Image (tube, helix red, strand yellow):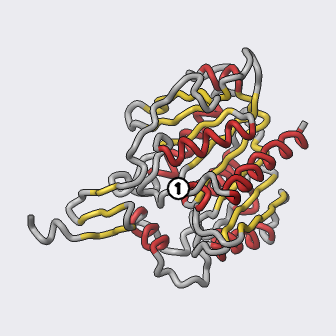
Amino acid sequence: MDSGTSEVVHEFLPYFRAYKDGRVDRNFGTDIVPPSINSQSGISTKDVEIVKETGLSARVYIPSTINPGQKLPILVYYHGGGFFMGSPFCPTYHNHVAALVAEANIVAVSVDYRLAPEHPVPIGYEDSWIALRWVASHYNGQGPEAWLREHGDFHRFFLVGDSIGGNIVHNMLAQAGVEGLQGVKLLGACLVQPYVSKTESVHTGVEDRSWLFSCPTTSGFDDPRINPAEDSRLSRLGCSKVLIFIAEKDDMRDRGLFYYETLRKSGWEGEVEIVETEGEDHVFHLFNPNCEKALALLKMLASFITKTRLLST
């Protein structure tokens, strides 16, 4: 093989490696859990196509015990993976969202946005917004997905994402604040150990190299999509409550704090809360979901949804 074509241009071992010739090795997010009705977990799932031409799709979850006509809050989930790996269909994210649906008693839509480098940013953001609008399009009893039409309560609507998915959540909130989201009352959002750019940070870590790799046209770390201090939309976020989770040993801990402080001082009129998990690293709850602290995080996230939806009634 030509040594030029085998040159590695980005790697995040042991999960991902990309080569100069365009080849990509992904070792995370490629395994698939098939959808199922009335699974042993008590959750039913189905996969839906949102845009046939691009392949944009999602996995929809409902509690298997849901009654005909019963309405539940809606959660839209955006997975992490640096814009270049991860999938709603892989065991890690499937199991996490299913556990959240069971704990919070909600309807969930986990978005399968397209990945870099085959589909560089901003495609991931664009797919995420199209998917969010597609979910919202069911608010009046129309739209192609029966579970959303029959069981979704569009006045109790939430967004959740981890890592770069938390960054996507921020951008969806910002876009919703500017453009609106017809028929939806976006009550709250949770950013779990989100990736953002802290203005004064040294940008040499894998997370920053991943951003430059996934978005080759970016202006850098002052890009308003990742730097909240540069985002003029920050004071207009389209929800009333934001919960941020950080982890003590996470390299991105200070960035989550930065997002919290920047949002709190932005003039946004909503409520923002931050919770730190001691002694844990980045997205520990995904890779060790049955540990005590991961279960506690899941319960706090479910409680945030439950309490926020009750306060809205």
Q: Which residue is mark 1?
A: 80
With 234 as the anchor, is 312 left or right in this view? Answer: right
Looking at the rendered structure, the secondary structure element under dot 1 is: loop
- Residue pictured at 52% horizontal, 26% vertical: 36
Quadrant for residue 242, please give it: bottom right
Of residue 310 and residue 184, the one placed in the foreground of this image is 310
Q: Amino acid at mark 1?
A: Gly
Q: Residues within 10 Å of mark 1 (few under 14, many from 20)?
A: many
Of residue 158 and residue 90, the one placed in the foreground of this image is 90
- Residue 280, x across and y down, in percent: 64, 69
With 262 as the anchor, is 142 left or right in this view? Answer: left
Outermost residue toward the top in this view: 68
- Residue pictured at 61% horizontal, 38% vertical: 98
Number of marks present in the image shown: 1
Of residue 123 and residue 210, the one placed in the foreground of this image is 210
Of residue 26 and residue 20, the one placed in the foreground of this image is 26
- Residue pictured at 67% horizontal, 42% vertical: 100
Residue 123 vertical placement versus 265 (above, below): above
Q: Quadrant of the C terminus?
A: top right
Residue 98 vertical placement versus 254 (above, below): above
Q: Quadrant of the N terminus?
A: bottom left
- Residue 276, x across and y down, in percent: 73, 68
Quadrant for residue 201, please give it: bottom right
With 263 as the anchor, is 218 left or right in this view? Answer: left
With 280 as the anchor, is 269 left or right in this view? Answer: right
Quadrant for residue 51, please give it: top left
- Residue 73, x across and y down, in percent: 75, 34
